[in-house]
Image (cartoon, rainbow, N blue to C red):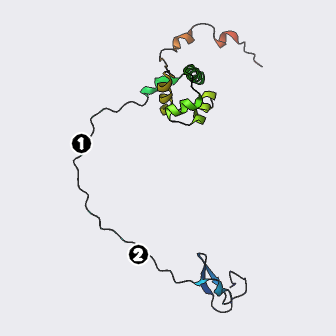
Amino acid sequence: MQCEICGAEIREKPIDVTIDGSQLKVCSKCSQYGNAARARSPVSRKISPVSPKPIRNVQKRTTSRRDPFAELDDELVDEYETVIREAREKRGWTQEVLAIEIKEKASLIKKIERGEITPEDSVRKKIEKALNVNLMERQGKDEWNADRLNSGTTLGDIVTIKRK
């Protein structure tokens, strides 16, 4: 076996030492560089006594859960960044002043006005309240009608199929 420090061949029994938290098998010359490693003893786990949990009389909520998809009818307006910038400039505020009003960073306002990011709901609501603007628009479900597809010219009316 070789010493794990100097690499010399160990003829007698190797000495276990601990150097900087690492346990090494070394020769008698290199054993001076570390502390003698003690045999590891397993650490016993203390098991805390388990006390019975008191049973509480819990009533279930009878309130109806809200539908998370109900809010999806609203969508952020196109060019929201322009709406925000114009409303801010109309009030004579800088981006820093708006940021202070809504308690957010000015860099966030700059990125929103450049259109780099879309504002999260919490930030959007603060901006709407501070500038008195509406950044959401209702998306109607009946804007698109499948009946329109059945009228007019189709691709089959135009294309001439060539066969080989």
Asked if residue 120 can be seen in this view, the reply is no
Quarter placement of the C terminus = top right
Q: Position of residue 39 (x, y in %)?
A: 51, 83
Query: What numbered label is drawn on residue 16?
Result: none
Along the line of sight, which residue is nearer the eye, 18 or 135? 135
Q: Position of residue 87 (x, y in %)?
A: 55, 21
Along the line of sight, which residue is nearer the eye, 1 or 34? 34
- Residues at circles 1 and 2 in contact by the CB criterion of under 8 Å: no
Task: Look at mark 2 in the image and give the residue it sits on.
Answer: 44
Residue 9 appears in which quarter of the rendering? bottom right
Label 1 residue SS: loop
**Residue type at numbered disc 1:** Gln
Q: Position of residue 67 (x, y in %)?
A: 39, 30
Q: Residue furthest right?
A: 164
Q: Residue furthest top?
A: 152
Residue 29 appears in which quarter of the rendering? bottom right
Residue in the image at 56% along x and 23% along y: 88
Task: Look at mark 1 in the image and give the residue it sits on.
Answer: 59
Mark 1 burial class by Cα count in 10 Å: few <14, some 14-19, many 20+: few
Q: Earlier in the sequence, mark 1 or mark 2?
A: 2
Label 2 residue SS: loop
**Residue type at numbered disc 2:** Ser
Q: With 95 as the anchor, is 124 left or right in this view?
A: left
Residue in the image at 23% along x and 53% along y: 55
Along the line of sight, which residue is nearer the eye, 154 or 35? 35
Q: Residue furthest bottom?
A: 12
Residue in the image at 69% along x and 10% along y: 158
